[in-house]
Image (tube, grey):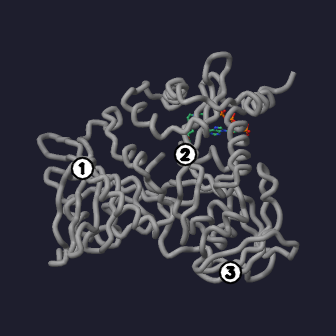
Amino acid sequence: MPTPTVIGYTRAMTDAVVPRAEDFDEIAALLALAFHNDLDPEMQAIERPIFEPERSLLVRDGRTAVAHAAAFSRDLAVPGADVPAAHVTMVGVAPTHRRRGLLSGLMRRQLREIRDARREPVAVLWASEGRIYPRFGYGSAAQRLVLSADTTGLRLPDPTPAEGTLRLDRPAAHAGELARLYERARADRPGWSRRDERWWAYVLAEVKSLRGGATERRVLLHDGPDGLDGYALYRTRDEWSAGVPRSEVQVAEVVAHTPAAYLALWRLLLSVDLTRRLSFPIAAVDEPLLRLVDEPRQLAPVLADGLWVRVVDVPAALAARRYAADVDVVVEVVDALLPENSGRWRLVGGPAGAECTATTAPAGLACDVRALGELYLGGATPAALAATGRVRELIPDTLATTTPAFTWHRSPTPMEVF
Ligand SMILES: CC(=O)SCCNC(=O)CCNC(=O)[C@H](O)C(C)(C)COP(=O)(O)OP(=O)(O)OC[C@H]1O[C@@H](n2cnc3c(N)ncnc32)[C@H](O)[C@@H]1OP(=O)(O)O
């Protein structure tokens, strides 16, 4: 009698089917179960248009859906380039079927299919728990700061005449303008995914059950000397305590193309009447706000993981991004799930582009594929990972020469949870 784990691996590899578009409701019911939600028709209506059934894998036990994983096809900003990336999502296993290897089987099959299609050199995801995905080769690549600010008395530098004007509106009326500003900013921000029209509809959709008592989303638009140059998406949540107003501003995203636009947007967000608190769960690790307010401690920043990267095709991925400084290094990679990634790879690159080829030359660095994911967006550095023991320096000085190349001038940042 095989152990349950062995049965699980075998089932998932052989039994997962590619569902049809009509199976979406069944999958939504499984995910509601796995994530402790009620089935929400409003949520289903906004998720259905972005669902790609042909990229979905479903395991049924008899007629019951018990495990699922899917991917969205989107481009991802990486240092100096834009690459197609499988955006892995909608992962869930029924409570009755957990810990039998169903997720493991789905992850193996999904990675194999992504690799064999040879279109997407990396896969990315947001993890519900940090310990789930490293075993499948995913590395924490774009961290974020979670801000939970007490805004009482918090001050920004005084306004200047260059700050322009602000307008407040409903976001849906400005989707085209927001898309233009976002896409321009994305080119310089590793970790941001392309949003086509379907994705803008998803990002701006309102699902009442997810609002937790907050208002509809509002958009704050900033016009500078050359026209629209920044926006902020936010809600407010009304709260009073013993007759004292304690409402909260909940900021979803701020995109600004000039320091003046950035300051003007934040000046309003930090000073909305009757509010005393502000939350901003996906702030950049290099968020300018922390260097602008007069008391950064009141922002109470907490470092958290955000986007995880799985390098699926080592030479294609390493050649697709750019490097902040010239680099010529041989890396010995180990990948237990996609053995074709294992071996020695010579990376020759710099700010203008890169090449990566198999080699038999001695390696300067050695790591597993998870560490490559952590390095990929410029968030972690070879030297920092060497301190954990997960990157090994095999030729002296290789860490010192490669670390500047793997960094980037903006820290990678995740954007929306998908
Ligand atoms: C990209 C996204 O969608 S993230 C969302 C992920 N989904 C959720 O969090 C919903 C709730 N959770 C679940 O549905 C399930 O618990 C899943 C999908 C996380 C795991 O599915 P399972 O089929 O139970 O995982 P599986 O049996 O393949 O586990 C493989 C290994 O990972 C470990 N593992 C799996 N999930 C977890 C977890 N949440 N915490 C710690 N370890 C875990 C298992 O113990 C096992 O380890 P072992 O090989 O050393 O025995």
Residue 282: image x %, image y %?
41, 55
Residue count near mark 2 (Cα–Cα under 10 Å), binned few <14, some 14–19, many ≥20 = many
Which residue position holds label 1? 173
Q: From mark 2 to mark 1, how far is it between C-alphas?
A: 26 Å
Cβ atoms under marks 2 and 3 closer than 8 Å: no
Question: Counting residues from the N terminus, which is met first, the one under dot 3 or under dot 1?
Answer: 1
Residue type (three-letter) at the residue carrying disc 2 = Phe
Cβ atoms under marks 2 and 1 closer than 8 Å: no
Which residue position holds label 3? 327
In front: label 3 or label 1? 1
Residue 344: image x %, image y %?
82, 68
Name the residue rendered at 72%, 40% in the picture.
Answer: 109
Which residue position holds label 2? 72
In terms of image quarters, where does ligand 1 lie?
A: top right
Task: From the viewer's perspective, tell me whether residue 26 is left or right of residue 214.
Answer: right
Q: Quadrant of residue 289?
A: bottom left
Within 8 Å of ligand 1, the CB of disc 2?
Answer: no
Up-down: is 116 above or below 91? below
* In the foreground, 23 or 385: 23
Name the residue rendered at 30%, 59% in the picture.
Answer: 177
For the residue labelled by badge 1, is the local secondary structure a helix, a strand or a loop?
helix
